[in-house]
Amino acid sequence: MDLKQIRTRIGSVRGVAIGVIAATVLVTMSTLVVQARSPEAVAPALASAPMSISGLPVQGQEVLGLIRQGGPFRYEKDGTVFGNRERLLPGQKRGYYREYTVPTPGLSHRGARRIVCGGFKPRWPDACYYTEDHYNSFRLVVQ
């Protein structure tokens, strides 16, 4: 093999390596862009129609009453800060949202139903949201 053939092979190997690196970077960046949540991607989770208090399960109506009374609550976790890590509720400072369990008849554990209320006065929340699927979707509860 002469020097010209060696240079040609090195050039083609270098070209393939650069192509592989470029493809890897492109795939990685595309994945990051797709996984990032924009505010527009978050909005549909609250797009379902608001619900009235009377539309809540009876247990949810009872929990709302307990929230306004300041308790007592059945579960230790009730009234603790809800972090909104799913980013499905409107963005607020940490500590704004608090979660409360809505008991499900027949279950011996907390189940999936919750009411999450926002505001810095827990007994008089600015807004409350109901989820029956453990934070996968929320509905605004209106008076």
Image: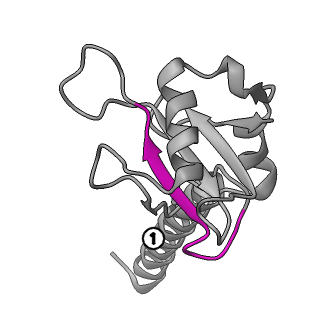
* Mark 1 residue crowding within 10 angstroms, few (<14) / some (14–19) / many (20+): few
User: Any magenta on residue 93?
Assistant: yes
The relative height of residue 103 versus residue 17 in the rendered view (above or below) is above
Q: Which span is picked out in magenta? A: 91-102
- Tell which residue pokes out farthest to the bottom in this image: 3
**Residue depicted at x 48% and y 60%:** 82
**Quadrant hosting residue 118:** bottom right
Q: How far across and how far down the image is residue 38, in percent?
A: 74, 58
**Residue depicted at x 69% and y 70%:** 92
Residue 90 in sight? yes
**Residue depicted at x 73% and y 51%:** 127
User: Any magenta on residue 46?
Assistant: no
Image position of 1 (left or right of 13)? left
Q: How far across and how far down the image is residue 33, in percent?
A: 65, 59
Q: Nearer the viewer, residue 131 or 35?
A: 131
Residue 23 in sight? no
Q: How far across and how far down the image is residue 37, in percent?
A: 66, 56
**Quadrant hosting residue 125:** bottom right
Q: Which residue is mark 1?
A: 17
What's the coloring here?
A: one colour
The relative height of residue 116 versus residue 60 in the rendered view (above or below) is below
What amino acid type is highlighted by mark number 1? Ala
Q: Nearer the viewer, residue 60 or 11?
A: 60
Q: Quadrant of the N terminus?
A: bottom left
**Residue depicted at x 56% and y 55%:** 31
Circle 1 — which element? helix
